[in-house]
Amino acid sequence: MDTKKSKTLLEVKDLCKHYPIRKGLFSRIAGYVYAVDGISFTINEGETLGLVGESGCGKSTVGRTILKLIEPSRGEIIWRGERIDELSRSQMRPYRQQIQAVFQDPYSSLNPRMRSADIVSEPLRNFESLSKAQGRERVSALFERVGLRPDQMLRFPHEFSGGQRQRVGIARALALSPDILIADEPTSALDVSIQARFLDLLLDLQSQLKFACLFISHDIAVVEILAHRIAVMQHGRLVEIGERDEILNNPKDPYTKALLAAVPVPDPKEQKKRREARAKLLAAAK
């Protein structure tokens, strides 16, 4: 994919999310936690940007801020040339169709009291006027598209495996044909073999539907499979961003080198060398 010829879909400028630390009887502000501290990046049409970093670095906060689930402390979120960071809940409604999400835990993100057909059709009911027959037809097609059977539509979330629940989550996210998918650690709760099938599915869907993706993960080996570009995050800041092959083959920042050194390899001797190298790199990155 030639990202240079693609139009910019999402632009994030100097994004910050600071949480106040309150102490004392009157809850005075004693300081701030800088969860996200001045990061900037763009995502082009049809492109996947992998946002990678260790747990607690602020990468999920970035995704939730873009989705307007939490408000930024500062910065700009620009969607197709229009700022959306200052929009109200009602003003954001037209953009909800274009920006959808898949979350980390496929069970807690699905309503346990709703059948899967109702879960997937909920966005359609909110944004489109469809008859019951049209709704069933759309949901059936979405189930087939994500590798589920139409006869599974009446099941509740607990009747699916973890991988199947995540497929239900993708079907719901794709119901409105979004332009971008914010995928927040969608494979971290899945077994390795199921992860591979999920990533294959996501690649196939993106190839067919041409949506862009912000793929958030702590695992750079997973990001390597999907991303056109990679952004590396540490302590609320971006330490490195660039084309996938450039980041993987010629990393500049010590922290990026440490993440790459932590990727498992089959040879035990090579793995031992990587562990030793990783310890040195992490010490240098602090």
Image: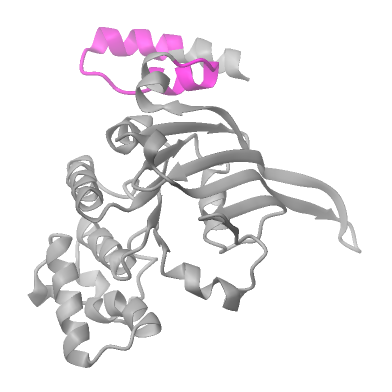
Total marks placed? 0
Quarter the C terminus occupies: top right
Quadrant of residue 147 within the rendered picture: bottom left
Quadrant of residue 229 within the rendered picture: top left
Residue 104 visible in the current orientation: no
Q: Residue at x 19, y 66 (%)?
A: 160
Q: Residue at x 16, y 68 (%)?
A: 143
Please state the horizontal and vertical placement of residue 273, each as a whole percent of the image.
36, 7
Residue 277 visible in the current orientation: yes
Query: Viewer-proximal residue, 282 or 208?
Result: 208
Quarter the N terminus occupies: top left
Query: Viewer-proximal residue, 248 or 105?
Result: 248
Query: Viewer-proximal residue, 46 or 123?
Result: 46
Q: Is residue 269 magenta?
A: yes
100 on left or right of 69? left
Q: Is residue 117 magenta?
A: no
Please state the horizontal and vertical placement of residue 2, each as a whole percent of the image.
33, 34
Q: Which residues are magenta?
A: 251-277
Main SS category, magenta section:
helix
Q: Residue at x 48, y 22 (%)?
A: 256
Q: Residue at x 50, y 55 (%)?
A: 80
Picture layout, residue 124 above or below residue 219: below
Please state the horizontal and vertical placement of residue 50, each as a whole percent of the image.
41, 38
286 on left or right of 262? right
Quadrant of residue 126 within the rendered picture: bottom left
Residue ranking furthest to the front: 5
